[in-house]
Image: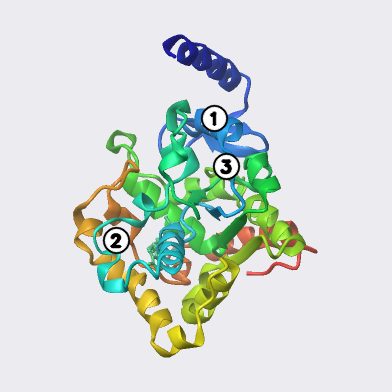
Amino acid sequence: TENNNLAETDVIADLLSSLPKEKSWQSGYVYRYQGFWCPEKQIPALIAFQKHFRAQKTDTILVTMPKSGTTWLKALAFSIMNRAKYTPSCSPLNSVNPHDLVPFFEFGLYANNQIPDLSTFQSPRMFATHVPYPSISDSIKNSGCRIVYLCRNPFDNFISSWHFLSKTRPEGLGPLLLEEAFDSFCNGHGGFGPFFDHVLGYWRESLERPEEVLFLTYEEMKEDINYQMKRLAEFLGCPFSLEEEADGIVEGISKLCSFSNLKDKEINKTGKSLLYFENKTLFRRGEVGDWTNYLTPEMVDRLNKIMEQKLAGSGLKF
Ligand code: A3P
């Protein structure tokens, strides 16, 4: 195995040296690989994931651009799927961060080129990823399993990313300038971007295969979480019964997964998830429209123009 790993390391070094790269907002580089900007560390993981992951029809894959509400979606989907097992008061979410309940392919499971033992995962299994549609494993595309995509308006997504990466990047790098990060976002260089390509890839798939790909937005969830949860439950094949609705199960889960409730859990105030950063960095404001406090009219204009151009004819609007 050691020799294999060494060989793989050489192959990856060769691959990286052949790819266009840009400075990451965090540290190191993002590489243009398979049409998107992949953070350096995730490239070996992506290769292992594409090669080894075998989807089952009963799997659910949660997909987002980073900072679009991944933590929230994981909490909700986990709670909806497991509601027969856990009432809100005895949910693992009271003591475990959502990222440790629904693992990422490219961060946790296949990180560093490792091949995880998935035999301990009971079906229906649930996984998550930030990988764009063209690059998720063929096995996912062909298995008929479910994909839930959550997107967020690009303005809030950018501001949320900027805050998060400012907080989690190595101190020695100095502050991440808003203007620089914005320029990079507009050029599509943020990790897993370009943003609009990512969103459109899943949007188109959701139009073509609505039974297999559900498209949700952060803004619609903020507006009416109970309604969106019912959509999600139905899509996941476990709709809320009238009796459950009458018993307040929908509200119970939405409250359990709410920003204010999760943010105040001890594990999310002081803990660290299996990911590399402190859990508290995952909970900032949790609102729609915070970008108005940061972006200049020129910045808004620039991003609006890009958005108009990218989304033209797609039927998708923010
Ligand atoms: P803000 O930075 O705008 O506050 P991700 O989970 O994809 O990393 O996204 C993080 C964003 O989702 C942050 O946005 C965070 O505050 C918000 N968030 C985290 N948990 C949430 C929840 N339970 N409900 C709503 N928003 C949440």
**Residue position marked by numbered label 1 in the rendering:** 48
Name the residue that disc number 2 marks: 92
Q: Residue 97 location in percent, x, y?
A: 31, 55
Q: Which residue is mark 3?
A: 189
Q: Which kind of residue does numbered mark 2 sit on? A: Pro
Label 2 crowd bin: few (<14), some (14–19), many (20+), radius 10 Å: some
Instruction: Pick the residue in front: 23 or 274.
Output: 274
Query: Which mark is in front, 3 or 2?
Result: 2
Name the quadrant of the C terminus: bottom right
Residue type indicated by callout 1: Ala
Tell me which numbered mark, 1 or 3, is placed earlier along the sequence: 1
Q: Helix, strand or loop at disc 1?
A: helix
Q: From this viewpoint, is residue 25 visible? A: no
Give the x, y percent position of residue 4. Answer: 49, 13
Mark in front: 2 vs 1: 2
Q: Nearer the viewer, mark 1 or mark 3?
A: 1
